[in-house]
Image: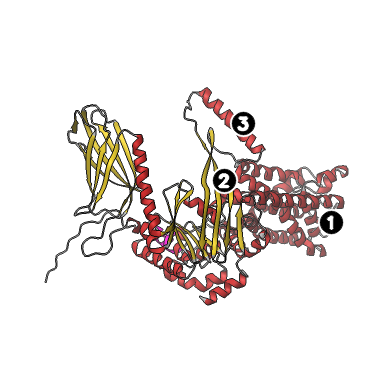
Amino acid sequence: MTEQNTNEEKRDPGPRTLILESGLTEKNYWSDLWAYRELFAILAWRDVAVQYKQTVIGVAWAVIRPLLTMIIFTVVFGTLAKLPSEGTSPYPVMVMAGMLPWFLFSTILSQAANSLVTNSNLIGKVYFPRLIVPTASSIVALVDFAVTFVLLLGLMVILGALPSWQILLLPFFVLLAVLAALGPALILASLNVRYRDFRFIVPFIVQFGMYVSPVGFASSVVPENLRLIYSINPVVGVIDGFRWCLLGGQADIYLPGFALSLLVVAFFLWLGIRTFRATEKTFADLF
Amino acid sequence: MTSDIVIRAEGLGKKYIIGHQSADRSNTFRDVITQNVKNFVRGARDMAQGKAIIAGDELEEFWALKNVDFEIKRGEVVGIIGRNGAGKSTLLKVLSRITEPSEGRVEIKGRVASLLEVGTGFHPELSGRENVYLNGAILGMTRAEINRKFDEIVDFSGVEKFLDTPVKRYSSGMYVRLAFAVAAHLEPEILIVDEVLAVGDAEFQKKCLGKMQDVAGQGRTVLFVSHNMGAIKSLCRTGILMKNGTVAHTGETQDTLDAYSRQLARSSEQANQRSSLHVERLVLDFNEVPKMKIQLAGLAVPSGTYEVRTFLTAVSGTAVGIGSVGGFGSKGLEIQNTQGKMSLSLELPNLARDIYLVTIELVDVKTHKVVSRLNLDEIDFAPPPLAGENHSLDASWGLGFNRLPLSLEMRD
């Protein structure tokens, strides 16, 4: 018993008074979020553990989906439409390098947007900072990403397009992809609780986004005078960054566009967190 | 806040907007279309204003809690009682931060853990072991804490053989035992519990009650909602009686329970005044065979042949039994020149202790139509123990509603 108490005190120095009032924003929100990090870890682990349960080929799904998409895009855009690749890099590698961040982005977007509804039983019965739910669900996408990344490395070795030092900067762009997805995902997740219409809208956004973003083709295909406008889509900056890292400098980053993408990512992240925090206290009433 | 008050609620209120179908909704194609268009316009307008969409044709404000004030001291074990819909669960949800109050404020000192359901977050595909960690983390335990108590939890649950089996293969009893075992090892400063003791078999219930008593004995503050008056009586020192979203009574447990039974008696009187048929007197007679004696008045029916039925239903909604005069193939009961009075006596031998609902119906045998119906709400049936025993069967133990008469003969 005594051991237990000292342990609790270590974690929670002195009882602080918690005040519940209508519309009162939580002062200790971010430190609370930190205190609940173990819950974050275990929810993320749960989603990963459950992801491929009761499937026959299991984690192979994380390979097959991008592989087939890559083949189709290479045939349609590279062979039939004869679009140019970035520099001298093989078309399949170029497509794969763009698809990696796209799948990361879109999986996080759709998983996180639905996460509150799929976890409604938790939200209605226990308190925790609700931000944990959508962020934890994005970890699954990172695990799939890691598997697909190995596939890409294999492809690069086979096609002889080895990466150079730029690949060391890849973690930064992975983080950028996650943040780019989380901003809109948080908005969609909070809206989805109120209006289930968004359950139907999200798959549409994902499908539409794949053709609007430079997944199957290189961004250099876009006319120079339109590139800045094109970069309003934050995924453009992310994909360009990925290609720059992975194609060994064959693809250039269009800097003004990249800066704009960064700004858009930051703006959506800010708006997402703000929307989410403004509505999270009512989630339990709406299920 | 003085140091020994750990929870203080002031003017607490919680409002919900509820929608219903309008009563005169007609079903012609044109009306359905107009109503749907109206609802669509309202939905779109609500969405534009960022409001939630509520199904139904008419909206109404509903205060689940209103002007709730109370104080709870450190180490107090408080029972919260009241009828269904009195606001008990909403109060617990507000206190455990699941939902935000609409007005007023609450001050809470200390780490709160709430147990509104056993097995929150259990995932069917994961094994028992994995679910212990998952559920523990959801209830607010740290990984180190769960590691330390893991053996104790498994021991308490009695499912050690199936720890590595997915819980979807568990029987419902095993599932509940494992879930409660995790919850029973929570050690927060303030524990909020909603009607979770009503699970498992009798032996396990006893274990749970014992565990709750331990927790209460350790100087922790516990808020406890239950319909099981026996559990409230044995666990709690003070009680809060909720009625229509407000606090109707606070004080010693026994006083609060008394106030509750007075409230129940009053409300069934009021309900009866509305219909012409009403109860003049209702007595539970526990001499020899327990009987419910009901004197009815206001029987305004034309002369004819009738059946009188008495339905007994448990608070949980389970039908317990039916008593009938004039039914089951008999010719019916002739009622002529009635003076509007009738006495019923329903024998309830071996019935377990619980809260029951009684419905009395008068049925015209020829047309099979219910001529008159009377609902008696929440009758607290608390029989004394039988000869030589010191417990009477409690329905909340999960053994059922009837003591089955058993006799035994010793032979040499």
Q: Nearer the viewer, mark 2 or mark 1?
A: 2
Residue at the image point whose x is 53% and y is 22% from the top: B30
In the picture of the structure, the residue carrying the numbered disc 3 is: B41
Say yes or no: labels 3 and 2 on the same chain: no
Which element type, helix, strand or loop, lies under badge 3?
helix
Chain letter of disc 2 in the image: A
Pointer 3 local density, CA inside 10 Å: few below 14, some 14–19, many at least 20: few
Q: Is residue B373 left or right of residue B146?
A: left
* Displayed quadrant of residue A167: bottom right
Q: Is residue B378 left or right of residue A234?
A: left
Q: Which residues are magenta?
A: B169-178
Instruction: Name the kind of residue labelled 2 in the image.
Output: Leu
The residue closer to the viewer here, A254 or B408, is: B408
Pointer 2 local density, CA inside 10 Å: few below 14, some 14–19, many at least 20: few
The location of residue B160, given as percent across then percent down, is 43, 69
Instruction: Name the kind of residue labelled 1 in the image.
Output: Gln
Which element type, helix, strand or loop, lies under badge 1?
loop
Q: Which corner quadrant holds the N terminus of chain B? A: bottom right
Q: Is residue A231 left or right of residue B35?
A: right
Q: Would residue A162 be visible to someone looking at this image?
A: no
In the picture of the structure, the residue carrying the numbered disc 2 is: A286
Chain letter of disc 3 in the image: B
Q: CA distance from mark 1 to mark 3?
A: 54 Å
Q: Which corner quadrant holds the C terminus of chain B? A: bottom left
Q: Main secondary structure of the magenta part?
A: helix
Residue at the image point whose x is 68% and y is 60% from the top: A30
In the picture of the structure, the residue carrying the numbered disc 1 is: A250
The residue closer to the viewer here, B112 or B296, is: B296
Q: Residue furthest right?
A: A225
The location of residue A39, given as percent across then percent down, is 59, 62
Q: Nearer the viewer, mark 1 or mark 3?
A: 3
